[in-house]
Image: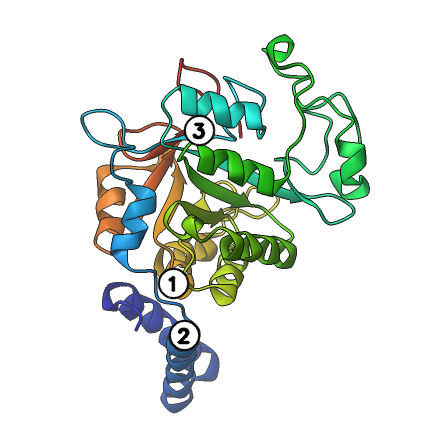
Amino acid sequence: MVPAADGLGFFSLVFLAALLITRGPMCSTLLTASLYIFLCLFRYPPVPASRAKQVLRPAGKQVGSRGVSVIAHRGGAHDAPENTLAAIRKANENGATGVELDVEFTADGVSVLMHDDTVDRTTNGTGHLSQMSYSDLLKLDAAAKHRLGDSFHGEKVPTLQDAILECLKHHLIIYFDVKGHADEAVAALKMMYEKYPVLYNTSIVCSFEPKIIYKMRQADSMVVTALTHRPWSLSHWGDGTPHILLDWSHHNILWNFCGVSAFLMQKNFISQDYVRFWAARDVEVVSWTVLGINYITDSLLEDCDPHY
């Protein structure tokens, strides 16, 4: 069922909106009740809290006196070339709890690690990833544009599977970040979970897009998931005008509909009240980049400008 604290406000709003449009209390009641039944029938409950805790607060892998999880953003993009096996190894060497990795696809459907939809920013190549085969991608140097590129010369863009195996070898928690290609990403991740069942207790699938998280839970309801959010992104229209309803729905309906176990929020928008808001709903807040709670960071060695 939808939690009363969130559901009551939402359905009251739906009822009032329907009442203004239809001018009939009976129609408004029927519309509100239909929506309530729809949400109850098609929502996914979150995974058991005990298993979500294994991923979000793994025993023996937390850092500092507060026992927080420190996740290397894109493998730790400041300390090594982002989204590479070298970055994963460096994150482990620097004491990370886990790594956040971006999932993308080549023209021939190979799942790889890449944040952008082009290779221009991080490699010595140019062009859209969706127009390159994996064999083309292997010809590029993934360290070419990194500040420490000379130390990692010749590093390749890894496949999703190779990255997973490297993480498992070092017992690192994995935050899979999916920004698009919902059907392909869900299928690829589902295959990885089936092939490596240990991922159920050592990884989480995250996305800015609720539809991706919903499809992931639909494909495999045992996967731990999280919604990622930043108020200036999905909660604004293209011209920067605030989209209040979308921002509100993320915090009051969509998280519950998808059954997420965590909410990833940019650190500038997190307060004690915000953390308490989610704690009351048994949802863990993960900050990016640093705030004294579980956080995602670009470097475990020094302060650096964030990689957005």
Mark 1: amino acid: Ile
Q: Looking at this view, is 229 or 46 the one in front?
A: 46
Q: What percent of the width, then of the height, locates residue 180?
A: 62, 50
Decide if residue 282 is in sight here: no
Above or below 269: residue 228: below
Q: Are marks 1 and 2 in contact (CB under 8 Å)?
A: yes
Q: Is residue 111 above or below residue 257?
A: above
Residue positioned most to the top: 150
Residue at image mark 3: 72
Whether residue 18 is visible, yes or no, is yes
Q: Count residues near mark 2 (Cα–Cα under 10 Å), then give few for <14, some for 14-19, many for 20+.
A: some
Which label sits in the foreground, 3 or 2? 3
Q: Amino acid at mark 2?
A: Leu
Q: Going from the N terminus, do you reach mark 1 or mark 3 first?
A: 3
> Residue 101: percent from the left, percent from the top?
52, 37
Which amino acid, mark 3? Ala
Give the residue drawn at x 36%, y 31%.
97
Distance, label 1 to label 2, CA atoms, is: 9 Å
Q: Quadrant of residue 24?
A: bottom left
* Residue at the disc numbered 2: 39
Contact? badges 1 and 3 (CB < 8 Å):
no
Q: Which residue is mark 1?
A: 253
Alpha carbons under labels 1 and 3: distance apart: 29 Å
Vertical order, 6 against 199 (above or below): below
**Quadrant assignment, res 288:** top left
Whole-angstrom CA distance, mark 3 to mark 2, is 35 Å
Tag 2 secondary structure = helix
Residue drawn 49% across and 50% down?
196
Q: Is residue 31 left or right of residue 7?
A: right
